[in-house]
Image (spheres, helix red, strand yellow):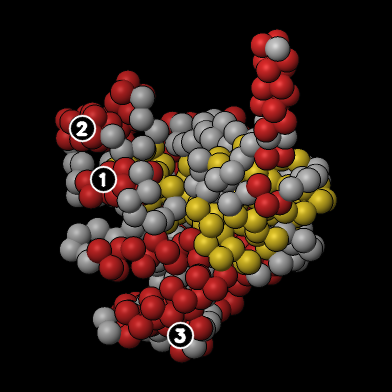
Amino acid sequence: MQRLFILICVILLGSCQPTPEQKITSGTLISDVSIIEVSSGNILEHQFVEIDSGKIRRILTSVKDLNSYQTVIDGKGKFLIPGLSEMHAHIPSPPVSKESLEDILFLYLSNGITTIRGMLGHPSHLELKKMVAKGEVLGPRIFTSSPSLNGNTVRTPEEAKAKVTQYQQDGYDFLKIHPGILRPVFDQIVMTANEVNIPFAGHVPVDVGIRHALNSGYSSIDHVDGFLEGLVPESAHVNPRENGFFGYDFTMLADTTLIPSLVGLSKKNKVWIVPTQSLFERWFAPVSSDQLLREPEMSYMPVTTLTNWKIRKEQSMGKDTGFSEVQWERFNAIRLQLIKALQENGHGMLLGSDAPQLFNVPGFSIHHEIEGMLHAGLSPLQILQSGTMNPAIYFERQEEFGQIKEGLAADLLLLGGNPLEDMQALKKLEGVMIAGRWIDRKTIDKKLKVIASHAENQ
């Protein structure tokens, strides 16, 4: 009798055990979605993506019981890609209100940007980075540069050594290089950075020059800075300090047959490139500020900011500045040629638009950057890679984010169209998931209205 009782208990216990499809009771499922593999461009149709504890737990081809999940997101007819990275972002520094700071972070998220690389660091950004990582502040994953290293902040090798050492100890992810640094000071920055193991990135100071910069091992050069100057033959005997806006004044002297040698140096020294081409097709371009100000996204920026943008654009390109549309056409054509060559034969490309900068609204500006990369001849897949898997490789975080794989962070974009066929699909954002937190289109639109109302009053 006792044996029969034990047998019945075992049978009852066995019948109560959940099937493999019922194990997750608190997770999220994205059902019947097409996954775009950014490493290859392949599309995996009818996939079911399980998310739990901020990560992709499993990717399945079928699920028997959708009711076993706390949240089910319908992915039928939609496409899933990894969250995008804005690799030349700016985070406001004090004095800035908590409201304004959180608005900027949400503008990035609202356009599918789940990782940002802050390019002008401040001590407050170190704390913000921790708060975002803990989920205390809603925003993209943050990597932050040090405060600016430039001709005013580091004037001697001794200053350079002290500041590089301190910034590394403070916990900044990398050093930000700005113009004006003298070559002996720059060399000390490089030497100390290598000693304390902290990368450096950003601009190429005129006194350094593009070839020495590339050979010095930048982790990234942004804006394609220094490259146009590097195309000027030595026989031209120019004063390098008369280069103008990113080499614009040297446009007519540039010898494009020198492009392969510069691209080869970038590949040899493993230097990533962040084009920020949107700056050169919006701010420094023959398009009126009034036309740009009519764009819907400008409603999310304070009126005072928009006014300052208009003034600065006119100061850069007004009648008395010497700006020439003919010269700009040649200048921009060279930039596009450089970007294409650096993609095809360089080390790699990173997606970055420099926002918020003149007429580059955070998040929204990444779509203008993508247009610029398309103008340069990059394919949709190459552009997607520059904003997903390439940043993960750059940060050596391939096992953390950048692709849709089991075990990686659930930083995901659900799209209403296929971006490999039309990059405008990135604007058809059904929702964004950041570290497993789902923000649907309705929530995004509601928050954007609030941000617009904040901007009206600033």
Q: Which residue is mark 3?
A: 293
Residue 271's place in the image compared with 297, above or below, is above
Disc marking residue 127: 1
- Measured along the vertical axis of the image, is residue 428 above or below residue 273? below
At label 2, the amino acid type is Gln
Q: Are marks 1 and 2 in contact (CB under 8 Å)?
A: no
Nearer to us in this view, 148 or 91: 91
Say what secondary structure mark 1 lies in: helix
Mark 3 and mark 2 lie on one chain; the one further toward the N terminus is 2
For the C terminus, the quadrant is bottom left
- Name the kind of residue labelled 1 in the image: Glu
> Which residue appears at 22% of the width and 66% of the height?
97
Question: Residue 39: x percent and y percent?
Answer: 72, 41
Q: Position of residue 183 (x, y in %)?
A: 31, 37
Provide the secondary structure element on which disc 3 rests. helix
CA–CA distance between discs 3 and 1?
34 Å
Residue 448 falls in image quadrant: bottom left
In this rendering, which labeled residue sits more in front, label 1 or label 2?
1
Q: Residues within 10 Å of mark 1 (few under 14, many from 20)?
A: few
**Residue 231 placement, left or right of 157:** right
User: Of the residues under marks 1 and 2, which one precedes in the sequence?
Assistant: 1
